C-alpha cells in the first residue's frame, strides 16, 4: 500500500519524560503529539507496546496482544479517583535520562494494585459495565493472558515449561483449578489491561484528531515464555517432551553482529497455522489495529525464508534457512481482513524472492541512510537508488544515533558522506541526514527523536545481541523546543512533505 509523501518521528512511549521513572501515557505524551502537529508531521512510529520480561525488550513480550502496564499514567488514575494525592507523592527520585526498570516495577505495580482495589470498590456502574464489555470483547487473548500472568507470578517468573506438568500442558482440570485459586490476580491483570487500552485509546484519538497516524510494530516472533506459546503450543516448533524451542529463531552474521543474532524465540509450525487458516495471526493483526493505524512488520523476510538454529546452540552461526509461508500467508490475511496497511522491515540478508513478496503486495520497504556510504554507487541505501514506495530513516532503534555513527565512521565512509553531501554543515551531521532523508524520493521519511536532538550514542536505544542495558533512554522536559518543530515544518514545505 503506497503511502502519501509525508514525514514522521520514531519514539517509543517509554522514552517520554515522567515523574515516575518511565515514559507513560499522561501529560508528556500529549505534549509530544502537540510537537508533532506543530512540526506538520503525519506519523508517529513506536516500538511494540507489549508487557516486557527479562531484558525489558519490547520485542520479547509476555503477550503479542497485551499492553505494557508500566506505561500507565498514575496521574490519570488519580484524576479518575482510583489513587490519592498521597499516592503520587511517594515517587522516589528516578534517574531522569534512563529507565531503571527494576525501580519502576517496585514503585508502580503496588500503586496499580491499589488502583485496582479502588476500582473494585468505588467504580461507577457505568465503569464496571465498560470493564465487563472490554473483557468480553478481548476475551480471545485476555483470558489466556490474565491467567498466564497470574501463574507466572505464582511461579516467581519461571518459564511456563518448568511449571507442574498439568498446568504447563493446560489440562482442563488444572486450568479450572488455577482460575478459581487465582481469581483476584486474574482480575488485576484484566483491570490493568482495561486501563491501558482506555488510556491508549484516548491518546490515539488525540493524535488522530491532530492529523497524526500511529505506526505500530509487530515482531514476527513471540517470546517463548509468553501467553501465546503457552496457550497455543501447537503453533510453534517445540520439543514435545520439554516444551523448549526445538528450533530457535535468529539471523545469520550480518551488519549488526559477527556471530549473528540468536533471539531464542521458537519458530512457527507454518503447516499447522495454515490448517487453521492462520487464525492466530488474524487475531494478532486485529489486536494491533486496535492500537495503531499502520503496522511495521519486523523481520519481514522471515515470511519468505527464515533462519533456524537447533536447540543447544549459543550463537546463530550454525543454522539453516527454511522456506516461509510466502504469498499464501498474506493472501489468507487479505481475504479475512482486507488490505492491511503494512510496512515491511526488509533489512539484513534480502533475496530477490523477499523483494518479490514485498512488491507483490505493494508493501513499502525500509531505507537506512547510515548504511549508504560504503560499497560504491550501487549501494541500495544511497538515495538516488530508492523507489518511491519506501520509508527512509536516518537510523533505527537498532542503530547508533547519527552523531554516534558519524564519530565511528571509517575514513573512507566519512569522505564518501562528505562528498555526497557537499560538506558537513554548521548545523551538524544529524541535520544534514535529516535534510537528505526529506529530500529523497521515498514517500515517507522517519527520524528518531535522538537525531532531532543531535545526541550521541549515550542516547542509543538498543545494541542488538546484548541482553541487558537496552531500551532505557529518555529525553527530558524542554528538549523538544519550538525551533525544532519549526525547522521540521520548513523542511516539509521545501520537500513536499506537509500534510495536504
Image (tube, rainbow, N blue to C red):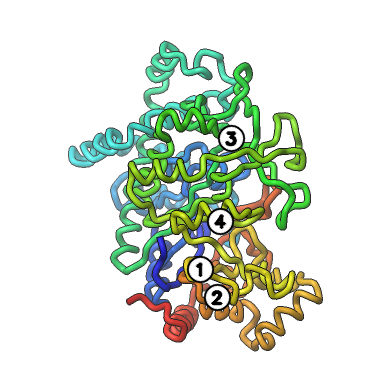
Q: CA distance from mark 1 to mark 2?
A: 8 Å
| Mark in front: 1 vs 4 | 4
Q: Which residue shows up at 42% across the image and 17% down it?
A: 175
Residue at 35% across / 46% down in the picture? 197
Residue with the mark numbered 3: 267
Count of marks overlaid on the render? 4
Label 2, on which residue? 437
Alpha carbon distance from label 4 to label 2:
22 Å
Residue 233 in picture, x, y percent from top left: 51, 25
- Residue 156 in view in this figure: yes
Q: Secondary structure at mark 4?
A: helix
N-terminal-most mark, 1 or 4:
4
Q: CA distance from mark 4 to mark 3?
A: 22 Å
Residue 253 horizontal/vertical position (percent): 74, 50
- Give the mark nearer the N terminus: 4 vs 3: 3
Task: Indicate the quadrant where residue 246 lies.
Answer: top right
* Residue extending farthest left: 125
**Which x, y percent locates residue 235?**
50, 29
**Given contact means CB atoms under 8 Å apart, are the residues at marks 1 and 3 in contact?**
no
Label annotation for residue 446: 1
- Residue closer to the observer: 183 or 269: 269
Q: Disc 1 to disc 4, how far (Cα)?
A: 21 Å
Q: Mark 3 Cα within 10 Å, few/some/many (few <14, many 20+)?
A: many
| CB atoms of marks 1 and 2 within 8 Å | yes
Locate residue 384 relative to residue 91 in the image: left or right.
Answer: right
- Marking on residue 230: none
Residue at the image position 62 percent from the left and 42 percent from the top: 306
Q: Which mark is residue 355?
A: 4
Amino acid at each position: 500500500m503506497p503511502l502519501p509523501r509525508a514525514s514522521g518521528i520514531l519514539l517509543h512511549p517509554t522514552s517520554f519524560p515522567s515523574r515516575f521513572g518511565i515514559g507513560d501515557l499522561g501529560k508528556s505524551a500529549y505534549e509530544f503529539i502537540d510537537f508533532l502537529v506543530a512540526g506538520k508531521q503525519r506519523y508517529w512510529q513506536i516500538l511494540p507496546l507489549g508487557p516486557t520480561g527479562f531484558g525489558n525488550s519490547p520485542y520479547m513480550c509476555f503477550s503479542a496482544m497485551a499492553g505494557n502496564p508500566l506505561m500507565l499514567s498514575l496521574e490519570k488514575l488519580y484524576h479518575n479517583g482510583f489513587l490519592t494525592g498521597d499516592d503520587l507523592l511517594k515517587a522516589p527520585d528516578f534517574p531522569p535520562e534512563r529507565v531503571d526498570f527494576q525501580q519502576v516495577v517496585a514503585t508502580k505495580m503496588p500503586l496499580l494494585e491499589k488502583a485496582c482495589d479502588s476500582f473494585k470498590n468505588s467504580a461507577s456502574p457505568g465503569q464496571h459495565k465498560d470493564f465487563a464489555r472490554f473483557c468480553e470483547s478481548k476475551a480471545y487473548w485476555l483470558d489466556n493472558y490474565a491467567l498466564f500472568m497470574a501463574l507466572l507470578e505464582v511461579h516467581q517468573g519461571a518459564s511456563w515449561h518448568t511449571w507442574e506438568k498439568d498446568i504447563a500442558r493446560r489440562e482442563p482440570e488444572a486450568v479450572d483449578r488455577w482460575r478459581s485459586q487465582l481469581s483476584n490476580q486474574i482480575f488485576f491483570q484484566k483491570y490493568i489491561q482495561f486501563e491501558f487500552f482506555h488510556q491508549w485509546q484516548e491518546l490515539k484519538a488525540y493524535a488522530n484528531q491532530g492529523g497524526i497516524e500511529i505506526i505500530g510494530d509487530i515482531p514476527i516472533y513471540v517470546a517463548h515464555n509468553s501467553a501465546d506459546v503457552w496457550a497455543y503450543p501447537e503453533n510453534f516448533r517445540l520439543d514435545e517432551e520439554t516444551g523448549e524451542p526445538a528450533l530457535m529463531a535468529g539471523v545469520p552474521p550480518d551488519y549488526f553482529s559477527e556471530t549473528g543474532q540468536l533471539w531464542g524465540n521458537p519458530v512457527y509450525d507454518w503447516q499447522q497455522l495454515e490448517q487453521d487458516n492462520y487464525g492466530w495471526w488474524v487475531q494478532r493483526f486485529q489486536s494491533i489495529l486496535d492500537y495503531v493505524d499502520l503496522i511495521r512488520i519486523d523481520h519481514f523476510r522471515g515470511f519468505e525464508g527464515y533462519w533456524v538454529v537447533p536447540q543447544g546452540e549459543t550463537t546463530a552461526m550454525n543454522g539453516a534457512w527454511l522456506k516461509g509461508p510466502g504469498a499464501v500467508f498474506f493472501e489468507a490475511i487479505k481475504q479475512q481482513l482486507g488490505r492491511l496497511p503494512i510496512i515491511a522491515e526488509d533489512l539484513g540478508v534480502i533475496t530477490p524472492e523477499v523483494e518479490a513478496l514485498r512488491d507483490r503486495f505493494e508493501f513499502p520497504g525500509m531505507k537506512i541512510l547510515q548504511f549508504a556510504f560504503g560499497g560504491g554507487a550501487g549501494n541500495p541505501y544511497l538515495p538516488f537508488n530508492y523507489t518511491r514506495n519506501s520509508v527512509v530513516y536516518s537510523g533505527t532503534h537498532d542503530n547508533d544515533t547519527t552523531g554516534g555513527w558519524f564519530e565511528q565512521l571509517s575514513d573512507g565512509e566519512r569522505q564518501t558522506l562528505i562528498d555526497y553531501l557537499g560538506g558537513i554543515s554548521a548545523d551538524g551531521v544529524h541535520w544534514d541526514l535529516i535534510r537528505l532523508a526529506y529530500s529523497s524520493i521515498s514517500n515517507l521519511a522517519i527520524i528518531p527523536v535522538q537525531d532531532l536532538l543531535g545526541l550521541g550514542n549515550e542516547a542509543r536505544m538498543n545494541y542488538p545481541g546484548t541482553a541487558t542495558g537496552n531500551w532505557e533512554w529518555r529525553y527530558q522536559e524542554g528538549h523538544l523546543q519550538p525551533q525544532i518543530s519549526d525547522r521540521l515544518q520548513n523542511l516539509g514545505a521545501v520537500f513536499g512533505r506537509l500534510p495536504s
